[in-house]
Amino acid sequence: MGMRFRALTALGASAALVTTPAVVADAATPTVRSGMAISIDDTVLTSNSCTLGAVISAKKALTAGHCGAVGRAVHDRTGKKIGTITANRIGQRLDIAVVGLAPRTSARIDTVDWDAKFHRGQLVWKSGITTGYGTGKVTDPAEVLRTSHGFSLAPPFLTSHDSFSVQTSLRSESGDSGAGVRDSRGRVVGILSSATLEGTGVVPVSRLPRALR
């Protein structure tokens, strides 16, 4: 599998690649859960490796918008197709994409706080495919527009995206993009977007339009 690489500031690709009970499916079908590694088609020869952030229903999940464009197939670690990008808000300065889950997938649905508010010093945690489980604190709760820059080994080589986000002290590296960021009660409150010298940017899920939830 070809891989597309980005700098740490655009965490979508990497060299590697509290939930509710799963929706019933037979053993042969893939199980979709937050924190799993996903691969999203990028070009004919390349793909992006990201983290699935939140399973919001039996039919929908979330990841970072810069991980893949609308219409791109989403695969699990074994190469099985688990869904397709059906909506992407990165063009609206919101680094979140919606994955429409494939039929006959088993989904471990997460608890999401769609009305979450952030405050300085708030404890948050995440599980990404590169750095694994980690805790941090909100260092800047202001939901402001931040620009992330990166590079890839496939055109356009130099990349950037703008997104509203809050700043945290979470540790993150390439491949962690899309990870669900949770509060102390285990509820998903944001999607991990990018890393800068100041910390890790998290996109609030409250900004996702209701029609896409």
Image (cartoon, rainbow, N blue to C red):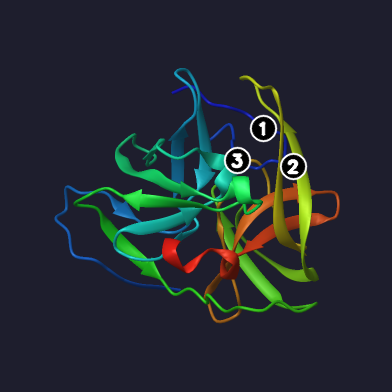
Label 1 vs label 2: CA separation? 8 Å
Query: What amino acid is at disc 3?
Result: Gly
* Residue at (65% x, 41% y) in the render: 174
Q: Left or right: 197 with respect to 49?
A: right
Q: Residue at label 1?
A: 6
* Residue at (80% x, 56% y) in the render: 199
Query: What amino acid is at disc 2?
Result: Thr
- Judged from the image, the secondary structure of the residue bearing numbered disc 3 is loop
Q: Residue at label 3?
A: 12
Q: Quadrant of residue 39?
A: top left
Instruction: Looking at the image, tell me whether mark 3 or mark 1 is earlier in sequence order.
Output: 1
Q: Residue at label 2?
A: 9
Q: Is residue 200 above or below residue 20?
A: above
Badge 3 vs badge 1, beta-carbon distance below 8 Å: yes
- Judged from the image, the secondary structure of the residue bearing numbered disc 2 is loop
Q: Is residue 124 visible?
A: yes
Quadrant where the C terminus is found in the figure: bottom left
Q: Is residue 17 visible?
A: no
Dot 3 alpha-carbon crowd within 10 angstroms: few under 14, some 14 to 19, many 20 or more: many
Q: Left or right: 136 with respect to 65?
A: right
Residue 179 appears at what percent x and percent y? 55, 55
